[in-house]
Image (cartoon, rainbow, N blue to C red):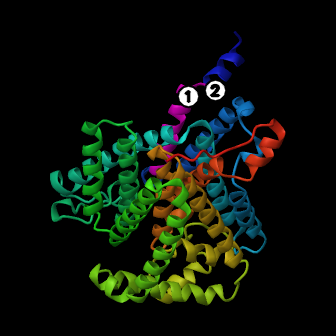
C-alpha cells in the first residue's frame, strides 16, 4: 500500500472524523481564549489549518457527497451577499477578513455536518463542553477563591466567592450563560437518547446549571424559559396521534403568536421582574442609534464586519455618540441590518427560519429524541440573537450553520433532484 493510500485511508476513517470533530469544537468554543492568550493571527491560523484538513477529509469522502446537498441555498446566498458588500464597505480589508472568518467557521460546520450524524455530533459537543465548563469552573476557583486575583488576560474578574457574575473562559457572563444553556440541551439529549449514563449525565447537567446561575446573565432566564416552552410543545406534538398532528401544530402556532403578543405588551413589567431594566435601557438606546445609520443605507448596509472593529466608521461614531465601547449591536438582527441592510436581514431570517421549520417537522415525526436537538438549538440561537450578536460570529455562527445543514439534510428540495438521478424516492417516515 502506497503512502497516498495510507493517508487517504486515515483521512477517511471514522477515528479521524471523531478526532477532527472534537478538535474543531474545542477550537471554536475556545476561540476567545485562544485569541486573548496569543493573538488573532494564532486563532486565524488554527481555524485555517482545520479548514484545510476538513477540505482534505471531504475530498477523500467525495463519493459519499452530493454536490447539490453540500450546503443550504439560504446559507450560500447569505455568504455571497456578505462578500458582495466588499463593493460598498467603508473598509475592504476588514470586510474581507471578517468574511473569511464567517466562511471559515461555516466551512468547519459543513464539514462536521457531512462526516458525523446528529447523535455523533451531539456526543462530541457534549464531551467538549463538559471539559470546557470544568476548565471554566477551575479557573474561576483559582482566580476568585485560591488566589483572589482577577485574570485580566482571560477577562475573568474573580467574583466566584461573591456569588458571581463569572465569565469562565468565554470572556463575558452572557457568553458563559449562552454556552451553559447549549450544554444543558446537549447533556439532556445525550441522557434521553441513552448515549450517556446517569452517573455522568446528572453531574454534567448540575455543572451547566450551576455555571448558568453563577453567570448572573439576564438572558439565561429568557433562554431557559423559551427552551422549556419549546420542549413542552415539541413533546406534545411528538406524542400526538399522526392524524391529529397537523391540527396540534396549528393550535400551538396560534398559542405561540398570542404569547409573543402578550410578552410584547407586558415587556416593561417583565423587564422589571428580571431586574434587567438598566441593561435593556442601554440596548434600546443603542438600537435606536443604529436605526439612524440604517436609514442612510437601508438596503445594502455599511458592509460586513462581524464584530465591530475599533476605529471603523460607523461603529466608532455610534460609540462616540453614546459615550460607550460597544463591540457589537448586542443583537444579531440589528447587527445584520446595520452591516448588510434589509436585504441581508431577510436572507439571515430565511436561513434561520427555514432551518427551524424543517428541523421542527423532522423532530415531530421521528421517534428518536436526538432529532429534537436541532430545533431546540435553533430556538436558543434565535432568542439569544435578540440580546447578543453571538449568532453572527464564532461559536454561534458555527452552530447556526451546523443546524441549518442538519435540517436541510432531512427535508430539502434537493432530495427530489437526487431521487430523479438515483431512482430512489426520498421519504420521511412518520413514527407515532
Percent across and percent down for residue 163 are: 18, 64
Query: Circles 2 and 1: CB distance less than 8 Å?
Result: yes
Q: Is residue 212 above or below residue 187?
A: below
Q: Does the magenta portion include 65?
A: no
Q: Is residue 117 above or below residue 293?
A: above
Q: Which residue is label 2 attached to? A: 12
Secondary structure mostly taken by the magenta-highlighted segment of the chain = helix
Residue at horizontal 25%, vertical 62%?
Answer: 214
Q: Is residue 82 visible?
A: yes
First to last magenta residue range: 12-29
Please state if 146 lies on the left or on the right of 16 as rendered: left
Q: Which residue is label 1 attached to? A: 16
Residue at horizontal 33%, vertical 83%?
Answer: 270
Percent across and percent down for residue 279 are: 36, 81
Q: Is residue 302 visible?
A: no
Percent across and percent down for residue 286 are: 49, 84
Please state if 362 lies on the left or on the right of 147 as rendered: right
Residue at horizontal 49%, vertical 78%?
Answer: 257
Specify few, some or many for label 2: CA neighbours under 10 Å numbering under 14, 14-19, or 20 or more. Answer: some
Q: Pick whichever, 245 or 48, lies toward us.
A: 245
Q: Pick whichever, 83 or 146, lies toward us.
A: 83
Disc 2 element: loop
Amino acid at each position: 500500500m502506497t503512502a497516498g493510500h495510507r493517508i487517504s485511508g486515515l483521512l477517511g476513517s471514522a477515528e479521524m472524523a471523531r478526532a477532527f470533530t472534537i478538535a474543531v469544537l474545542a477550537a471554536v468554543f475556545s476561540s476567545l481564549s485562544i485569541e486573548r492568550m496569543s493573538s488573532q493571527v494564532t486563532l486565524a491560523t488554527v481555524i485555517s489549518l482545520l479548514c484545510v484538513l476538513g477540505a482534505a477529509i471531504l475530498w477523500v469522502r467525495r463519493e459519499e457527497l452530493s454536490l447539490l446537498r453540500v450546503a443550504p441555498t439560504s446559507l450560500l446566498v447569505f455568504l455571497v451577499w456578505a462578500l458582495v458588500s466588499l463593493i460598498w464597505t467603508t473598509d475592504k480589508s476588514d470586510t474581507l477578513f471578517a468574511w473569511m472568518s464567517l466562511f471559515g467557521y461555516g466551512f468547519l460546520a459543513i464539514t462536521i455536518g457531512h462526516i458525523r450524524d446528529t447523535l455523533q455530533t451531539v456526543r462530541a459537543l457534549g464531551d467538549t463542553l463538559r471539559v470546557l465548563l470544568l476548565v471554566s469552573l477551575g479557573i474561576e476557583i483559582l482566580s476568585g477563591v485560591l488566589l483572589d486575583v482577577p485574570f485580566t488576560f482571560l477577562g475573568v474578574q474573580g467574583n466566584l466567592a461573591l456569588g458571581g457574575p463569572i465569565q469562565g473562559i468565554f470572556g463575558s457572563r452572557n457568553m458563559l450563560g449562552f454556552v451553559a444553556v447549549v450544554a444543558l440541551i446537549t447533556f439532556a439529549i445525550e441522557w434521553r437518547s441513552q448515549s450517556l449514563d446517569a452517573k455522568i449525565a446528572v453531574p454534567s447537567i448540575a455543572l451547566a446549571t450551576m455555571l448558568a446561575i453563577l453567570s448572573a446573565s439576564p438572558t439565561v432566564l429568557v433562554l431557559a424559559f423559551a427552551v422549556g416552552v419549546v420542549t413542552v410543545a415539541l413533546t406534545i406534538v411528538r406524542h400526538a396521534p399522526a392524524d391529529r398532528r397537523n391540527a396540534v401544530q396549528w393550535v400551538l402556532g396560534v398559542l405561540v403568536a398570542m404569547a409573543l403578543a402578550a410578552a410584547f405588551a407586558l415587556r416593561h413589567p417583565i423587564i422589571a421582574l428580571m431586574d434587567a431594566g438598566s441593561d435593556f435601557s442601554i440596548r434600546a438606546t443603542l438600537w435606536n442609534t443604529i436605526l439612524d445609520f440604517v436609514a442612510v443605507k437601508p438596503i445594502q448596509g455599511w458592509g460586513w464586519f462581524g464584530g465591530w472593529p475599533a476605529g471603523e466608521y460607523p461603529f466608532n461614531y455610534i460609540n462616540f455618540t453614546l459615550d460607550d465601547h460597544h463591540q457589537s449591536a448586542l443583537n444579531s438582527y440589528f447587527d445584520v441590518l446595520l452591516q448588510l441592510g434589509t436585504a441581508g436581514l431577510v436572507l439571515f431570517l430565511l436561513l434561520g427560519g427555514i432551518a427551524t421549520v424543517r428541523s421542527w417537522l423532522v423532530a415531530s415525526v421521528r421517534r428518536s429524541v436526538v432529532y429534537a436537538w436541532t430545533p431546540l438549538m435553533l430556538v436558543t440561537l434565535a432568542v439569544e440573537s435578540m440580546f447578543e450578536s453571538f449568532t453572527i460570529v464564532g461559536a454561534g455562527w458555527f452552530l447556526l450553520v451546523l443546524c441549518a445543514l442538519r435540517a436541510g439534510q432531512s427535508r430539502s428540495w434537493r432530495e427530489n433532484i437526487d431521487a430523479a438521478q438515483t431512482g430512489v424516492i426520498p421519504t420521511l417516515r412518520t413514527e407515532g
